[in-house]
Amino acid sequence: MSISRVAVVGAGILGVAAAREVTKRFPDAEITVFDKAENVAAHQSGHTSGIVDSGLGQKPGSAEAKLTRRGLELLIPYMAEAGVPYRECGQLLIAQNTDEAERLEEIFARAKDNEVPGARLLERHEIGAVEPAVRGVLGLFSPHAAIADFSALTAALASDVRAAGGTFRFGTEVTGFDTMSNEVRLRGRPVPPEDSPAGEGAPAGESDQADRGANTAGDRVGSGKDAVDDRDRRDDQAHDRDQRDDQVHDRPRTYRGEEGREPVIGIADELRDRFGQKDWFKQAESTLGEWTQKVSDAWANRDGSRLGDSGSRTGDAPSGRSRSEAPAEEVLGTFDIVIVCAGLQTDRLAVSAGLDAEPRIVPFTSDFYRSPATDTEVVRGIIGSVPDPQSPFAETSIVRGLDDGLILGPNTFVALGREAYDRHGFDLADITSTARSKGFWKFAAQTAKTAARGVKPLVSKTAFVDGIRRFVPELDQNDVAPGARGVRAQAMTAEGELIDELTMTRRGRLTVVRSVPKWAATSALAIAETIVDRAFENAAR
């Protein structure tokens, strides 16, 4: 049969890239992209440091290495043609001791096997020629590594989709699927604008109100410069919010599936039972207590006991629409092919389609800091720590951004909400979901020893910056301020193993992307090819 109607759920970089790939292969197909946010790149795609991965350290011959190479072949010419902000600046991984130096040599061997152009080891006395302010015992330099504006890239891809006749339905939450022999019916509901999660890092120019629930085309995507300016304004607004008094926010949340929204009063007790005798836990216990108190206070007011006369919550009670007020579910349409690239909500949507719950998504918060340093001798390009397989979330970097300011991070820890970008925010059901995950507790137990190094930076910006200054002693701590916050969707098995590869599940005409490589933004165009290949397998039957 012919393919005439295609839907993509998720307007992040992968979803939009997949939609564009469909328009290229099937120009006569009617393509619709659904997202509950008000713009593209509202989540992970719009909350990154912008590093374009050059392929360092990936297993030679692996699918991920091939995707990176193919992704770069497609990405760089596309960004040049579309005018997406991009700068080749080089990347330098720095070893601080003999253990890290040994791992760095292993990474270099992989880089050679992966044919990363120009990659070379730098002895201590050679490091200064590349990055004068950096200190270390050994360096690995990749001269063609780059940074890019992935929000602007997603916007450009969205423009291509619209130009090919595709439409975007923003503010539309997909809640379920009915899979039939040759069709998939989408169910969902509109998301009121005040409840729709907005990405701080996404260009405001992408929010096309004419696309909310209507199949009308129109290209209103801002230019790359507009995207950068808009993001800077949002960063300033986010910083202003961080200066306000502490407030508790229970963010509106979607794709709940069968998970209950019940109190998680015992989460700190659970942590204490498992790790209470560990030194690293004792250091963080006060922070856990604060989290627990916030959860307890929020749950105590769930029945509206602190509602004011107007019906709105008062004081520090959670804000947001209750489930009873949510719009009724409706049929969004019936399609020949449906592709789900939902990131943080992938496992919940998979369950709603009758697929396995595993692998589950465990959200990890990635906090970034900013420094207005303009002296190019402080950092010229990208400075990174040496990856440690035993501590997969300990990697940090210093990046000279497209605006010449410095981006430090990420400071990574378990998130208190899948979409909790506010630094005082959390989501009760998301915390419950993580606490109920057997895989998460196994992962925590496996990494407990190395977690000790991460607790102090988690609770102290000063400690985090001190760790960064091991590489760049000249960095002025007084100039460092909070920057963007992202939430990373980490797929995890029931055994606590992290999945860092492209994984898809298919049921009839429905294809769900369950996990993606760490540097998926770099490989987005190549991953889109693979997703569409899989989604359209045997579609003509």
Image (cartoon, rainbow, N blue to C red):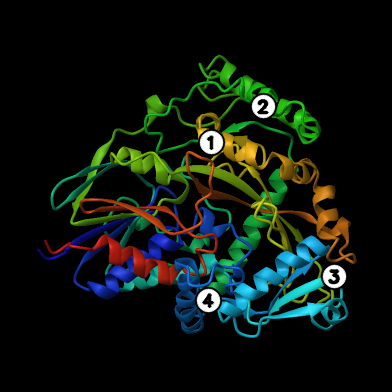
Kind of residue sitting beneath label 2: Arg
Point out the frontmost of discs 2 and 1: 2
Q: Nearer the viewer, residue 504 or 131?
A: 504
Q: Nearer the viewer, residue 457 or 273?
A: 273
Looking at marks 2 and 1 on the same chain, the residue that comes earlier in the sequence is marked by 1
Q: Mark 4 packing: few (<14 Cα in 10 Å), some, or many (20+)?
A: many
Residue at horizontal 43 percent and vertical 59 percent from the top: 502
In the rendering, which numbered label is found on residue 137? 3
In the rendering, which numbered label is found on residue 403? none
Looking at marks 2 and 4 on the same chain, the residue that comes earlier in the sequence is marked by 4
Q: Which residue is mark 2?
A: 274
Q: Which residue is mark 1?
A: 251
SS under mark 2: helix
In the visual, does 321 lie left or right of 145? Answer: left
SS under mark 4: loop
Q: Mark 2 packing: few (<14 Cα in 10 Å), some, or many (20+)?
A: some
Looking at marks 4 and 1 on the same chain, the residue that comes earlier in the sequence is marked by 4
Question: Dividing the picture into quarters, in which one does residue 167 lie?
Answer: bottom left
In the rendering, which numbered label is found on residue 84? 4
Report the Cα–Cα distance between label 4 and label 1.
32 Å
Report the Cα–Cα distance between label 3 and label 1.
45 Å
Residue at horizontal 48 percent and vertical 66 percent from the top: 64
Report the Cα–Cα distance between label 3 and label 4.
36 Å
- Give residue 424's position: percent from left, percent from top: 66, 37
Residue at horizontal 58 percent and vertical 34 percent from the top: 441
Q: Nearer the viewer, residue 365 or 53?
A: 53
Question: Dividing the picture into quarters, in which one does residue 479 lie?
Answer: bottom right
